[in-house]
C-alpha cells in the first residue's frame, strides 16, 4: 500500500493508472476503522482495479459543540488494517489539501430537501459538510466508483442524488450494514459508550427487529410501529432524536408501511448519538 498526503502526490500515482483505463474505487472514511469500513473495501476490490481509501476527519461536518477534537484517530492501527486488506492507496489529506481556500469562503453544494430531513434537522451543518468533502474528494480522485455504507442511509441517498444531479461519471455503490454480534451497527463512535451504555445500545437493533416482526404479522400503521420502538428505546435509557418510517427514495414519512419502507433511528445513549436503519421486508 502506498500512503500519500497531498493532492499532487495522489494524482501522480493515479494519472498513469487512469491512462491505462484502470477502474478506480474510492472509499471515503474518517478512520478509526472497523469491519464496516473493511466491508466497503472488500466490495471495492470486487468492482475495481485500484482501491483508494481516504482518511480525513472532515471539520466542516462537525458543529462547534460536537466531537471533532475527541474523534478517534488511531492512524497506525488503521494503516495495518488497510495493508492487510490489500488497499492500493491510502490518502490522508490535511485541511489545507481539502480546503485550499479555507473552510468559510469556499464553494458549497446545497441539496435542500433531502439534507434537511432526519439527521439534517438536529445537525443542519452535517450534510453541507459531507457534500463539501465528498465533492472535493471526487474532484481530487476522479474515481470510477465510490463506496458508501447503508449505515449512513441518508448520506448514501444524498450523495447518490448529488452524483445524478451533477452528471458525475461515478458509480455510487451502497453496501450493507455490518453489525456486532448483538446487532449494534458498527461505528467508530461505539467506543464512547460505557459498558452499561454499550449493553443498552443493543435496544436499537432489538426495536427494529420487533417492528419488523409486527409488520410481518400484519401491522402496517407506521405510528403503531414507532410507538413500539419508542417504548423499547426509552426503557433502555435512550433519549430519542427521531424514529421515522420513511420512503427510501424521498426520505419522506409514510403513514402506511409497505415492503421496502425503511425505519430510521437516531438516539442518544448518554452523550453518544447513535444512528441505525433497516428495510421492512
Ligand atoms: P465514517 O468513517 O464513519 O465516515 O464511515 C465511512 C464509511 O463507512 C461510510 O460510507 C459509512 O456509511 C461506512 N460505514 C460505517 N459504519 C458502517 C457499518 N457498520 N456497516 C457498513 N458501512 C459502514
Image (cartoon, rainbow, N blue to C red):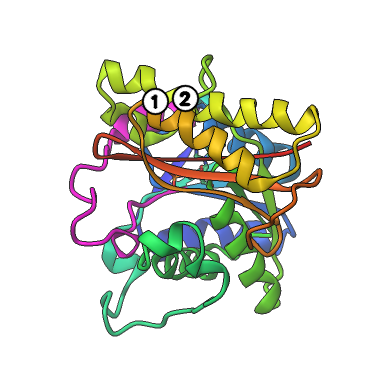
Where residue 187 sits in the image (x, y, percent)?
A: 43, 34
- 249 or 5, which is in the foreground? 249
Q: Is residue 94 left or right of residue 112?
A: left
Local secondary structure at mark 2: helix
Are discs 2 and 1 less than 8 Å apart at CB?
Answer: yes
Local secondary structure at mark 1: helix
Which numbered dot is residue 235? Answer: 1
Which residue is pictured at 49% across the width and 63% down the height? 134
Q: Earlier in the sequence, mark 2 or mark 1?
A: 2
Circle 2 residue: 203
**67 drawn magenta:** yes
Mark 2: give few (<14), some (14-19) or many (20+) Cα within 10 Å: many
User: Can I make out residue 67 in this image?
Assistant: yes
Which residue is pictured at 74% across the width and 51% down the height? 256
**5 drawn magenta:** no
- Identify whether 162 is placed above or below 46: below
Which stretch is magenta? 54-83
Question: Which quadrant of the rendered structure holds the C terminus?
Answer: top right
- Determine the image quadrant of residue 254: bottom right
- Determine the image quadrant of residue 44: top right
Which residue is pictured at 38% across the width and 24% down the height? 236
Where residue 50 sits in the image (x, y, percent)?
A: 64, 46
User: Can I make out residue 186 in this image?
Assistant: no
Label 2 – label 1 distance at C-alpha: 9 Å
Q: Is mark 1 within 8 Å of ligand 1?
A: no
Q: Is residue 108 left or right of residue 24?
A: left
Which numbered dot is residue 185? Answer: none
Amino acid at each position: 500500500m502506498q500512503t500519500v498526503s497531498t493532492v499532487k502526490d495522489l494524482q501522480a500515482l493515479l494519472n498513469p493508472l487512469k491512462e491505462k483505463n484502470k477502474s478506480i474505487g474510492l472509499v471515503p472514511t474518517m478512520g478509526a476503522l472497523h469491519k464496516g469500513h473493511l466491508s466497503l473495501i472488500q466490495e471495492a476490490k470486487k468492482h475495481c482495479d485500484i482501491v483508494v481509501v481516504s482518511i480525513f476527519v472532515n471539520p466542516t461536518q462537525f458543529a462547534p459543540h460536537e466531537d471533532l477534537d475527541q474523534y478517534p484517530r488511531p492512524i497506525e492501527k488503521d494503516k495495518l488494517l488497510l495493508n492487510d486488506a490489500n488497499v492500493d492507496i491510502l490518502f490522508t489529506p490535511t485541511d489545507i489539501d481539502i480546503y485550499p481556500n479555507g473552510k468559510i469562503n469556499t464553494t458549497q453544494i446545497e441539496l435542500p430537501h433531502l439534507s434537511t430531513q432526519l439527521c439534517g434537522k438536529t445537525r443542519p451543518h452535517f450534510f453541507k459538510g459531507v457534500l463539501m468533502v465528498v465533492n472535493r474528494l471526487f474532484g481530487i480522485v476522479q474515481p470510477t466508483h465510490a463506496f458508501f455504507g447503508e449505515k449512513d442511509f441518508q448520506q448514501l441517498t444524498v450523495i447518490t442524488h448529488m452524483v445524478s444531479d451533477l452528471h458525475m461519471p461515478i458509480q455510487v455503490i451502497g453496501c450493507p450494514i455490518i453489525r456486532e454480534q448483538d446487532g449494534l451497527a458498527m461505528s467508530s463512535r461505539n467506543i464512547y459508550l460505557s459498558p452499561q451504555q454499550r449493553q443498552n445500545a443493543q435496544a436499537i437493533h432489538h426495536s427494529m427487529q420487533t417492528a419488523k416482526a409486527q409488520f410481518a404479522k400484519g401491522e402496517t400503521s407506521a405510528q403503531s410501529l414507532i410507538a413500539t420502538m419508542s417504548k423499547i428505546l426509552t426503557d433502555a435509557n435512550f433519549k430519542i432524536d427521531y424514529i421515522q418510517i420513511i420512503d427510501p427514495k424521498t426520505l419522506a414519512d409514510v403513514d402506511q408501511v409497505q415492503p421496502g419502507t425503511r425505519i430510521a433511528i437516531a438516539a442518544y445513549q448518554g452523550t453518544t448519538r447513535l444512528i441505525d436503519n433497516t428495510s421492512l421486508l
